[in-house]
Image (cartoon, grey):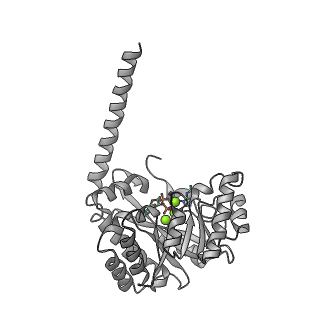
Amino acid sequence: NAKSSGRGTYKRFDVAMHAQLQAHQQVKIALRGALERNEFELHYQPLVSLSSRRVTGCEALLRWRNPERGMVAPSEFIPIAEETGLIVPIGEWILNQACRQAAQWPEHVSIAINLSPVQFKHRNLVKAVADALSASRLTPARLQLEITESVLLDESEHNLQLLQELRSLGVKIAMDDFGTGYSSLGYLRTFPFDKIKVDQAFVRDLPHGRESLAIVKAVAGLGHSLGMTTTIEGIETEDQLAIVNAEGFHEVQGYIFSRPLPASEVSKLIDGPLEKGGASPVYERFANS
Ligand code: C2E
Ligand code: MG
Ligand code: MG
Ligand code: MG
């Protein structure tokens, strides 16, 4: 009857919850010391200029290779690294590693690094960025810091000041995952971002999604009138590429040109001619997915 099946449902729910909590706990434990054990690496995904069809920069994307778990996806461990505060030392490692790598690339190729809201709240951020720049001797203008609007949700005066301070180091500031939060537009008014990166959510149903198309068009126009570089992520097909090209986006990032790659592989794309669908998916196989 309804009552007993109801109880059964709760029980199953409890079991699932328990398993989830346990998995979470295990990731937490495994993450501790992962930095010291050298389990992190960075992969780099090219940003491609639509006018020149050359690689203008790469986004550093964190990868965790754990001996027991294999390659763990960022979505599985970054939230836990944030919750535990481990993202702060990991984030400093990323800054240093990525800047040193980028310093090996030609001067016209930049490096984009994701900043977690937790790093943003940490008082050491400006110094950490400045230190990574001076240790690598990377030209500051080649460093782009990607932030999502979740970074800016509170203490807006303080946040604006922090953005200004970062910018005064000479780095560029990009708004990542544009359109996924609820006040993306408001932030464009309060802070002059150098770049807007449209989230891949608006690309997924192109070329057919009318709403997505309208939004993509609007952002391209907005970027041009505000003098910001416009980038769009998650481009996988020729049709999608044709649309964002027609709308006048400056650059794209997506599997159509390349998946995120280890440094040794991405440098071939930086130096050589770019072929569509060039990179093998072998580098992007995560455990449990
Ligand atoms: P994001 O910053 O928006 O990064 C773009 C994500 O889209 C990456 O996933 C990338 O692999 C994926 N992607 C790029 N092109 C395509 C495509 O054509 N199709 C599809 N389906 N996906 C594509 P990834 O590496 O799994 O990272 C997920 C998120 O984790 C990132 O989103 C970012 O928010 C976070 N993350 C990754 N690395 C770092 C890091 O070093 N630090 C911090 N704080 N967050 C990071
Ligand atoms: Mg990003
Ligand atoms: Mg993004
Ligand atoms: Mg995104």
**Does 186 appear above or below 97?**
above
- Side of 86 relative to 117 (left or right): left
Q: Nearer the viewer, residue 272 or 91?
A: 91
Q: Is residue 73 visible?
A: no
**Does 138 appear above or below 67?**
below
- Side of 94 relative to 220 (left or right): left
Indicate the position of residue 5 as horizontal and vertical percent values: 40, 18
Q: Considering the image in quadrants, where does the N terminus appear?
A: top left
Indicate the position of residue 21 as horizontal and vertical percent values: 31, 42
Indicate the position of residue 47 as horizontal and vertical percent values: 57, 71
**Does 34 appear above or below 28?**
below
Q: Is residue 267 visible?
A: yes
Indicate the position of residue 23 as horizontal and vertical percent values: 33, 44
Q: What number of labels is visible?
A: 0
Q: Nearer the viewer, residue 19 or 69?
A: 19
Residue at position x 40%, y 54% in the image: 72
Residue at position x 65%, y 68% in the image: 220
Image quarter of residue 278: bottom right
Residue at position x 65%, y 51% in the image: 205
**Does 13 appear above or below 186?**
above
Residue at position x 57%, y 60% in the image: 280
Image quarter of residue 89: bottom left
